[in-house]
Image (spheres, rainbow, N blue to C red):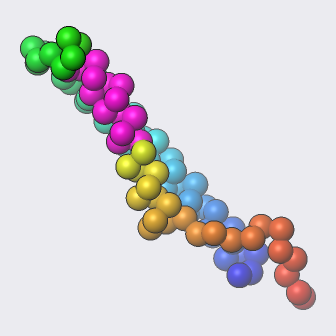
Amino acid sequence: MTDFEKLQQIKKEAAVTGAALLTLIIFWCVAGFGMAGIDVSVFYLPLWAVTGTVGVWAFAILMVCVMVKFFFKDMDLTEVEDK
């Protein structure tokens, strides 16, 4: 893999990570604030507290698994390219 290809891959991974962060923030707002009007309890906690904490945590783990499987590549960054 050339240095240019590595740079392109790094840019792609950074863009996907940024998009995942934005998606996670939106999910956190919806799962936390969006569920505040629903009068349901889970383990004596309001639903918004459970979805805003455990739900966001589980969603983040799911997003990381998807990113690693489909977008990230394992590459050696210390490899010296022959010129």
- The part of the image, by quadrant, that contains residue 77 is bottom right
Q: Kindly identify the residue that appears in the image at 50 percent across and 47 percent down.
A: 18
Q: Quadrant of the C terminus?
A: bottom right
Q: Residue furthest left?
A: 39
Q: Nearer the viewer, residue 80 or 39?
A: 39
Q: Residue furthest front?
A: 43
Q: Kindly identify the residue that appears in the image at 31 percent across and 25 percent down.
A: 52
Q: In the rendered view, does 82 fall on the left or right side of 31?
A: right
Q: Is 50 situated above or below 55?
A: above
Work out whether residue 54 can be spotted: yes
Q: Is 62 situated above or below 35?
A: below
- The part of the image, by quadrant, that contains residue 36 is top left
Magenta-span inclusion, residue 52: yes
Work out whether residue 28 can be spotted: no
Q: Quadrant of the N terminus?
A: bottom right
Q: In the rendered view, does 4 fall on the left or right side of 52?
A: right
Q: Residue furthest bottom?
A: 83
Q: Kindly identify the residue that appears in the image at 28 percent across and 18 percent down.
A: 49
Residue 54: horizontal and vertical position, in percent?
34, 29
Residue 57: horizontal and vertical position, in percent?
40, 35
Q: In the rendered view, does 11 fall on the left or right side of 33?
A: right
Residue 26: horizontal and vertical position, in percent?
33, 35
Magenta-span inclusion, residue 45: no
Magenta region's main secondary structure?
helix
Q: Kindly identify the residue that appears in the image at 31 percent across and 33 percent down.
A: 55
Q: In the rendered view, does 12 fall on the left or right side of 81?
A: left
Q: Is 6 situated above or below 2?
A: above
From which residue to which does the magenta span run?
Answer: 46-60
Residue 10: horizontal and vertical position, in percent?
64, 63
